[in-house]
Amino acid sequence: EAQVTQNPRYLITVTGKKLTVTCSQNMNHEYMSWYRQDPGLGLRQIYYSMNVEVTDKGDVPEGYKVSRKEKRNFPLILESPSPNQTSLYFCASSLNLASEAFFGQGTRLTVV
Amino acid sequence: AQSVSQHNHHVILSEAASLELGCNYSYGGTVNLFWYVQYPGQHLQLLLKYFSGDPLVKGIKGFEAEFIKSKFSFNLRKPSVQWSDTAEYFCAVENGNTGKLIFGQGTTLQVKP
């Protein structure tokens, strides 16, 4: 089954404790991206990657890191999480530009 | 800077009413346009998209959207809504050169049976 898989689905952590949210897709898509969804703000793009070893900043990259060492995986790294990073995070992949984005189920992160 | 604006934040309609959700963007270059829907507790799903050709595009579940280049708009329409259309709707604009994707703030649609 074609899908985008994020882990974990729920995470509560403390300020400053490094964490990684994994994202994997099995559709051989070139384009992958991360978003955060906050009430009243819609989805805001954090980082995106148009291919292996190519990553670019989205609208809200501060406090986040990503890597794209292989096509299927695009982990999101929070080196030192802060409470303002409490949010619902979505990973998405698409074949290329102008293609439908397939979204993961989301990761609800709470930083206390 | 590229931005997307959805004018209606919360819309309440009765079943069988017609729907139009506005979406405007600010970017003068090549764009690819999308409408996504998010049902309660679920992830986003594509309703329809436009990247070239006929500016009137049809999507799933009876939705359609019209791209008006001169107005930088991509409004979503449906002639007759159903209770099952209750969801949040997002317009998204992709920069055709860089691939950067910007979403609007979303419109919550509530359809009363």
Image: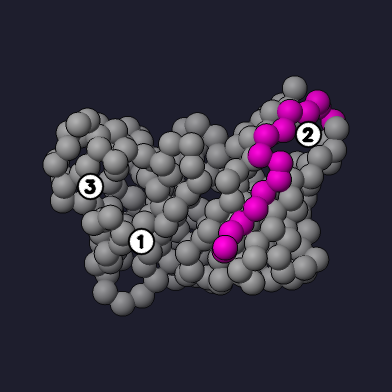
SS type, badge 1:
strand
- Of mark 1 and mark 3, the one earlier in the sequence is 3
Q: Is residue B102 left or right of residue B20?
A: right
Q: Which residue appears farthest toward the front when viewing the image?
A: A1
State whether discs 1 and 3 lie on one chain.
yes
Give the Cα separation between the discs numbered 1 and 3: 15 Å
Which mark is drawn over residue B48?
1
Spot occupied by residue B98 in the image (x, y as percentages of width and height):
58, 67
Foreground tag (2 vs 1): 1
**Disc 3 is attached to a residue of which chain?**
B
Given contact means CB atoms under 8 Å apart, are the residues at marks 1 and 3 in contact? no
| Magenta-drawn segment | A1-16
| Residue A13 magenta-highlighted | yes
When asked about the image quadrant of residue A87, the answer is top right
Q: Residue at x 65, y 53 (%)?
A: A5
Q: Is residue A88 left or right of residue B24?
A: right
Q: Which residue appears farthest toward the top when viewing the image?
A: A112
Q: Residue at x 35, y 36 (%)?
A: B108
Question: B42 or A61: which is nearer to us?
Answer: B42
Residue picked out by circle 2: A81
Residue picked out by circle 3: B20
Q: Is residue A85 left or right of residue A70?
A: left
State whether discs 2 and 1 lie on one chain.
no
SS type, badge 3:
strand
Give the Cα separation between the discs numbered 3 and 2: 40 Å
Spot occupied by residue A38 in the image (x, y as percentages of width and height):
54, 34
Q: Residue at x 66, y 39 (%)?
A: A9
**Disc 2 is attached to a residue of which chain?**
A
Q: Residue at x 41, y 52 (%)?
A: B36
Q: Amino acid at mark 3?
A: Glu
